[in-house]
Image (tube, rainbow, N blue to C red):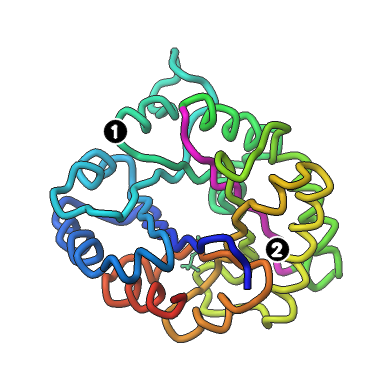
Amino acid sequence: MSSIKPLIAGNWKMNGLRADMDEFAAMAQGFSSELASKADAMICPPFTLIAALANHPDRGALAVGAQDCHPAASGAHTGDISAAMIADCGATAIIVGHSERRHDHDEGDALVAEKAQAVWEAGLTAIICVGETEAERRGGTTLSVIEQQLAGSVPLGATSRNTIIAYEPVWAIGTGLTPGTDDVAEVHGFVRSFLEGRFSEEGTAMRLLYGGSVKPGNASELMLVPDVNGALVGGASLKATDFLGILRAVS
Ligand code: PGA
């Protein structure tokens, strides 16, 4: 058994209006001290809800994060949001390099690394995402793709406190498909060795999340895979019953 406390992080993506704060309140109320003793939990809403959720009177131990940030701390970048602004709203972590950012906005590893640095400079934790496409998996290049993304996206200076890695196969995101547990074990083992090679004991202690179609029905088997220290959850983090179901499956 790993001594790393699991984290279940929900990524609401471009979903969530003020009316959905009730759903957040239901999650927070259901995140009992018994569940919280076994796993940490976080919701990453759109920017527009960060402050409201972070200051929600029922928030309790449910942490709040963000889904992206600009690499600069401030300046002439119309429409962008900096890590310092996100920290100022009460969030404690920021996802960077999510595949939807990499693909929809053409974000490459160097930019993801700059964003991770910006997250650290704001005193927050970076959740850095990596993952292969379906064509890369079929072509047998999964591990080399992951190695390249880790080498380019995780800056020197990463520690188990300022960085979390999320392995999210692109073809598993939002599709209902998940890799076999052997495949997840292979990639997570590879990620762990890479991190240990680069960051020694900090790499051993770093949390590695699996993401891609995690739901209450498959969470327990995925969370039992060696070197899986939690999940990054999209669709199933929008409803309190599903999100709490995943948390219960971990414990
Ligand atoms: P999904 O998304 O759980 O809806 O597959 C996961 C993610 O994109 O983080």
Q: Hey, what amino acid is under mark 2? A: Thr
Residue at horizontal 29 percent and vertical 33 percent from the top = 89
> As rendered, which of 138 and 41 lies closer to the eye?
41
Q: Quick check: 126 above or below 206?
A: above
Q: Is mark 1 within 8 Å of ligand 1?
A: no
For mark 2, what is the residue?
133
Residue at horizontal 66 percent and vertical 37 percent from the top = 158
Residue 180 image position (x, y, % from top left) = 68, 82
> As rendered, which of 163 and 213 lies closer to the eye?
163
Q: Is the N terminus in the top left, top right, bottom left or bottom right quadrant?
A: bottom right
> As rendered, which of 101 and 218 lies closer to the eye?
218
**Range of the magenta residues?**
123-134
| Contact check, label 2 and label 1, Cβ < 8 Å | no
2 or 1: tag closer to the N-terminus: 1
Residue at horizontal 45 percent and vertical 42 percent from the top = 93
For mark 1, what is the residue?
89
* Secondary structure at numbered mark 1: loop
Q: Quick check: 9 above or below 98?
A: below
Residue 200 image position (x, y, % from top left) = 78, 45
* Secondary structure at numbered mark 2: loop
**Label 2, label 1: how far apart the Cα atoms are:** 34 Å
